[in-house]
């Protein structure tokens, strides 16, 4: 088996192993060109001009794929490093390669870059790798920060083959252990000779920033410190395990005995993630001595969470309160606590003031904002000597004010839509340690910052493969920059935004037996054929457009290039003056503009004999010459490829 085929087999195997994450290897395949698209990077000067008989090389599949979803670089870890499979096509033309480890949300490919590299592997064709391994260390030997990372593959080739730039799917560098939470509902129970009058429901919860949780174990410990009952299982891929029901009896090791009245039992939840991190949380259950009131008290949050950030969306949490045996209630207390971090807020009252509901604004008793996390509300009801005190506990709920972490990737950086061109691939990645991502949207803004195309839906976001056609059915303009704005919001109303940019290529469109080159960004100084004596930003864009045009025309060596110059008519509203202006001034001026561009293209390696120069003056404006704001667009040169 050849080296490239063996590498491809590794890539496919890695992709299959990651299929549970719904990820696919990033690949580059040969483009279908009719006409061909401009490569992301212009070829070297020695490869820019080839004989007509020498066909350009076609890109072969390339890919870079992490072989796992993440790792924990520690001696206690089950996965101390991350392996990355590498496949580089066109091996015989390879000059050099480079793989950089970068933050996954460091920006999209193309103009925005990839963020600062944490680690770089590089070499030449002779030492091309099939697999690399990263131990989580940066170039200074220190451990990188916890987060999502990606591998960026770059390669340069000979014979005019475009440079390669690929970004892998993200993988996690996980350093933090999970944060478990355990809630006993109710935390105070009534005994019977066989156990408990009603079972205790233990609600299990745990949060992990990056590493999936693998397993859990719940030990009920008796007053003597010995394990009284044990439950355990695998942690589900989504959400939390179903509540664990304890009937008050011990397991076989405890002789199956019933819980003792008037004693306190402890419950310890232990969780472990896929990389070996472990953590524990503890809760207590009190077995009462006196009977309970016939009617039970209750407290219930209205929603699963809220975001008290002052934006007017889900800024408070409301609770419904139920007081069992109301006529016997003497006093009550509602405590709102952060799991494992103490009481944040307390509300109190006494009979006959028994409210049906309460609202919490997310602030603690001192008026300061409470930290993010999982909370629960506990209602304590005192019946005096009539009944045992009642304790009711709510399901847990979330306080979350942090917007989702949102990453946006758009490729290729140089977009060439139309016949034979590749679509623009847009991918979103979003995460939140506390909230479920709910909605997403992507807007493509034109150079005037107007919405050109829009995509939206419920999370998870699908990959967008855009053909360059806007909402009105028009195609993107040539040689322009479009801004891409992505937004994501979570279930509690927190939202975030990420941006990228994409440059459009020179578009070549089939027009009968010739090609029309769609480019309108070469701007001339008024009344002249000068395209350089302009504000620096515009002059730079003109030079960039000429570079792209030369590279595009070099791919059509058998075609002649017709350059048609245009101009703006000053006397557009006076035919008597406009006719001589057209004949004596504008036609020569427009021809001079076409000649100036032909000279610039010749300087970039195109033969002058291929070019046909024509000037039509103001005969074919793209906007009315009376439009004083936009008529600068009429000062232009159009291009056609003809046999």
Image: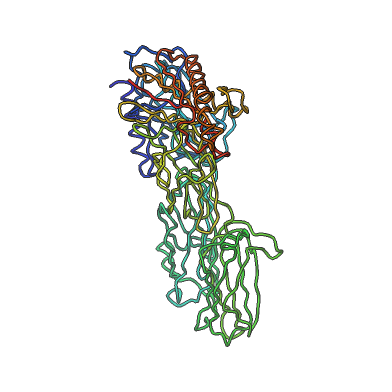
Q: Position of residue 549 (x, y in %)?
A: 45, 23
- Say which of 274 and 484 sits in front: 484
Toward which corner of the image does residue 310 lie, by quadrant? bottom right
Q: Name the residue rendered at 56%, 24% in the picture.
A: 531
Residue at 69% over, 66% down? 365
Q: Quadrant of residue 631?
A: top right
Q: Residue 418 sits in which quadrant?
A: top left
Q: Nearer the viewer, residue 535 or 14?
A: 535
Q: Give the image location of residue 109, x and y in percent.
A: 49, 33
Q: Is residue 102 above or below residue 46?
A: below
Q: How many marks?
A: 0
Which x, y percent locates residue 48?
Answer: 43, 15
Q: Residue at x 33, y 26 (%)?
A: 514
Q: Residue furthest right?
A: 366
290 lies above or below 202 = below
What quarter of the picture does the N terminus occupy?
Answer: top left
Left or right position of 154 against 496: left
Q: Nearer the viewer, residue 49 or 635?
A: 635
In the image, farthest residue toward the left: 1
On the image, the x and y values in percent for residue 375 come to 57, 62
Specify the farthest residue to the bottom. 327
Q: How is the image coloured?
A: rainbow
Residue 289 visible: yes
Image quarter where the C terminus lies is top left
- Residue at point 52%, 48% (across, down): 209
Q: Nearer the viewer, residue 208 or 576?
A: 576
Q: Is residue 113 visible?
A: no
């Amino acid at each position: 088996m050849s080296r490239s085929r063996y590498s491809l087999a590794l890539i496919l195997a890695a992709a299959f192993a990651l299929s549970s994450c719904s990820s696919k290897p990033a690949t580059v395949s040969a483009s279908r060109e009719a006409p061909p698209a401009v490569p992301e990077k212009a070829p070297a000067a020695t490869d820019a001009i080839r004989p007509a008989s020498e066909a350009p090389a076609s890109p072969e599949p390339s890919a870079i794929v992490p072989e796992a979803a993440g790792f924990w670089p520690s001696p206690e870890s089950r996965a101390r490093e991350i392996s990355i499979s590498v496949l580089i096509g066109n091996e015989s033309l390879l000059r050099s390669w480079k793989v950089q480890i970068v933050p996954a949300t460091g920006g999209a490919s193309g103009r925005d870059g990839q963020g600062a590299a944490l680690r770089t592997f590089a070499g030449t064709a002779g030492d091309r790798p099939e697999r690399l391994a990263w131990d989580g260390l940066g170039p200074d030997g220190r451990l990188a920060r916890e987060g999502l990372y990606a591998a960026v593959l770059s390669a340069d080739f000979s014979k005019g083959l475009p440079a390669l730039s690929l970004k892998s799917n993200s993988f996690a560098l996980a350093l933090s252990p999970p944060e478990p939470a355990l809630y006993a509902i109710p935390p105070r129970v009534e005994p019977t000779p066989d156990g408990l009058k009603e079972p205790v429901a233990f609600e299990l919860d745990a949060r992990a920033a990056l590493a999936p949780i693998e397993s859990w174990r719940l030990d009920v410990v008796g007053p003597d410190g010995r394990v009284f009952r044990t439950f355990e299982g695998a942690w589900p891929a989504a959400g939390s395990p179903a509540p664990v029901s304890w009937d008050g009896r011990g397991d076989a090791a405890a002789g199956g005995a019933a819980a003792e009245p008037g004693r306190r039992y402890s419950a310890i939840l232990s969780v472990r993630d896929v990389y070996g991190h472990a953590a524990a949380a503890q809760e207590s259950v009190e077995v009462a001595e006196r009977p309970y009131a016939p009617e039970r008290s209750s407290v219930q949050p209205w929603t699963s969470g809220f975001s008290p950030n002052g934006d007017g969306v889900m800024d408070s949490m409301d609770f419904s309160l139920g007081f069992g045996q109301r006529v016997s209630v003497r006093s009550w207390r509602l405590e709102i606590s952060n799991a494992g971090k103490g009481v944040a807020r307390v509300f109190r009252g006494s009979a006959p003031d028994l409210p049906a509901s309460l609202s919490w604004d997310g602030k603690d008793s001192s008026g300061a904002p409470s930290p993010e996390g999982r909370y629960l509300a506990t209602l304590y009801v005192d019946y005096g000597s009539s009944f045992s005190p009642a304790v009711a506990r709510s399901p847990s709920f979330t306080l979350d004010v942090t917007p989702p972490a949102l990453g946006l990737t758009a490729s290729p950086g140089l977009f060439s839509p139309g016949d034979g061109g590749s679509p623009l691939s847009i991918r979103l990645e979003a995460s939140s340690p506390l909230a479920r991502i709910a909605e997403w949207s992507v807007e493509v803004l034109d150079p005037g910052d107007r919405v050109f195309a829009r995509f939206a839906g419920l999370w998870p976001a699908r990959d967008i493969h855009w053909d360059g056609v806007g909402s009105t059915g028009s195609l993107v303009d040539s040689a322009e920059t479009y801004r891409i704005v992505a937004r994501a919001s979570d279930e509690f109303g927190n939202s975030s935004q990420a941006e990228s940019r994409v440059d459009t290529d020179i578009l070549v469109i089939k027009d009968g037996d010739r090609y029309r080159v769609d480019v309108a960004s070469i701007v001339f100084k008024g009344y002249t054929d000068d395209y350089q004596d302009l504000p620096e930003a515009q002059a730079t864009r003109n030079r960039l457009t000429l570079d792209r045009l030369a590279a595009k025309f070099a791919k059509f060596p058998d075609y002649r290039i017709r350059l048609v110059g245009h101009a703006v008519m000053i006397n557009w509203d006076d035919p008597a003056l406009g006719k001589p202006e057209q004949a004596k001034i504008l036609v020569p001026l427009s021809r001079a503009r076409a000649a100036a561009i032909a000279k610039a293209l010749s300087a970039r390696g195109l033969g002058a004999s291929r070019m046909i120069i024509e000037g039509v003056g103001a005969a074919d404006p793209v906007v009315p010459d009376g439009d004083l704001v936009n008529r600068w667009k009429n000062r232009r040169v159009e291009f056609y490829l003809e046999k």
